Image: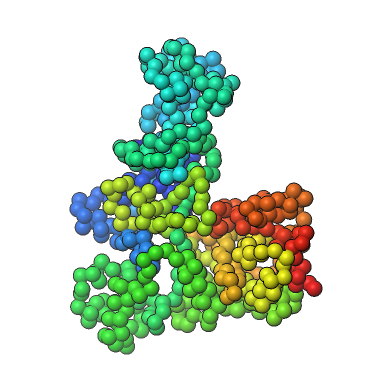
Amino acid sequence: MVTKYSSPVKKSALATYSGPGSVVRLSNGITAVVASLDDWDASICEDCRSEEERRETLEKLYIHEPYLEGICGVDGFVVMPTRRNGWSEDTAPTVSVYRFPLSQICSNWNCSRIFKAKETDTPHAKCPNPNCGFYGNQVDMFWICPNGHLEEIDWAEIAHHGKPCSSNAAIRRVTLNGPLGCKCLDCGAASGPTNYPIRKKCNGIRAWEADARPEECKEDMTLVERTNTQIYYPENLSVLRLPNKHGLRDDLMDWLIDRKSMLELSPEPGLLKERAERFLDELEDMSLDDFERHVKEALEPSDWDESWDETAVRRNEWDVLTGPRPQGRAARELLDFQDAVFPDDPDLFGGKGMFSRLVRIDRLSETRVLGGFQRLVETEDGKGFSPQEGKNLLWSRNGRKDWLPVYRANGEGLLFVMNPVSVEKWRKTSGREASTYALAHTFAHIFLSAIAHHCGYPTASLCERLYVEEGMHYGFLIYTANSDYLGTLGGLVDLADSEALCEIMRRAIEEARWCPQDPVCIGSDRGGYGGACHHCCMLPETSCESRPRNSHLDRALLIGRGSTTGFVEYQSR
């Protein structure tokens, strides 16, 4: 385990692209793989002498989201604590990483010897060749598997083409023979530019686990460089915090859920109510029966489901965001929104415009849980992903598996409600099988990119959230996705009541008519979609929610192309 090095990391990154199993670059230049949650758990509970003490320690850190807890089969979710959470500099938990790969290549061109560094070596370990004296650089390639496995390159095996060598002689890198060009300094066996493998049989190695035994795997491994984005695709489960249903008090439900372990001991309801009255206002007048109804909902949420259903989650969020404004102080502390005054632009807003409604969300809270990860191929919209299977990748095979990493972002947003009548009419006359999801997604990208230049937030701090159900509703939410000060500046919602918003939207639509890469861009075909590249529509991966990232984008759905009638063109008739 690496204890010699330290590198800062954002809390939100630990629940996304720097989670267990990811390959990260430390501040000293070393590449390392983030350890499994078993190591995180050991760091958090280092001073715990019993399972009961461990449970009490985790209870203080848990963030609860009952729906996600039921789906993932965990007791709660944890944000790694820091000194700001009351931990001292010496006792604050750390996230362990393992140096990966260990192989180094001597920086001396005349030597180029490949050797293994130790976990505790300096970033540039010294070459073992006594006649050299130079330092090595970490190998920048390794093998990955679709099932999540990681493996170092066996240079001796490559040089000898899988055959045994008579000695343990050193291997020398021969860059002229390709990325895996190498030569045995004893027998002279070498791999050339045409006979080295780019795929190999997977040995089932989980490099992010301490002393993990290889497991059976039937997949082939692919050679990748350490900067390749295919190494780690986080699988996140994301929900917005919504006011409680069934007439329940939000502040009381939060208080009860945070003390769930105490509720499981079945305390006397009257005494529990008296304790709650010390922390919450206006609770004295609540009947004991009503209080017990809150306790029952905290222990057994009625909204639990056995599987992750993102469509149902989004439908529920849409119904709340397009419904009446939340009532009560406790509810508005979670979520507060109201209809924005329509800007004076009938082509954009109103009964015959592209958008029928604009909702300014002054306060929202998003809970994003890391439920697993994928490598090499990111499946479309997470198809085939199971939180239970994903949890097995984050923990070791014998791990406790009772919590997962999370981060909660508090911010603001704008909900653009597309005119369903206009969308349906356009879809039937567009000239081809048009995707309303791709239409809303493309609108979200061009608006987010344009708004970022005016609201004071960097593009990577904004995120999209799509609400599309054929024949029912079409819309998208642009919101701040950071848990730090970049999520609460107020510049985003201020645009809702300003005349500048119409100008921003019109300019974004106009700029979408032309891309520096046209006609190549507008004429491209990526799985049935085209007209999208990093010069016009694509966004940072942290801002795009589609999977694969930056997919289902097509400017032609907006501006038209060939026989396809664009939505903007259709509306201007």
**From where the camera sits, is residue 14 visible?**
no
Q: Is residue 270 left or right of residue 314?
A: left
Q: Residue at x 67, y 60 (%)?
A: 446
Instruction: Give whichever of 227, 483 is nearer the camera.
Output: 227
**Residue lying farthest to the right in this orientation:** 573
Q: Is residue 498 left or right of residue 392?
A: right
Give the image quarter of residue 564: bottom right
Quadrant placement of the C terminus: bottom right
Q: Residue at x 60, y 79 (%)?
A: 339
Q: Residue at x 74, y 52 (%)?
A: 523
Instruction: Give whichever of 106, 457 is nearer the camera.
Output: 106
Q: Position of residue 145 (x, y in %)?
A: 45, 41
Q: Position of residue 394 (x, y in %)?
A: 37, 49
**From where the camera sits, is residue 288 visible?**
yes
Q: Is residue 543 above or below residue 354?
A: above
Q: How is the image coloured?
A: rainbow
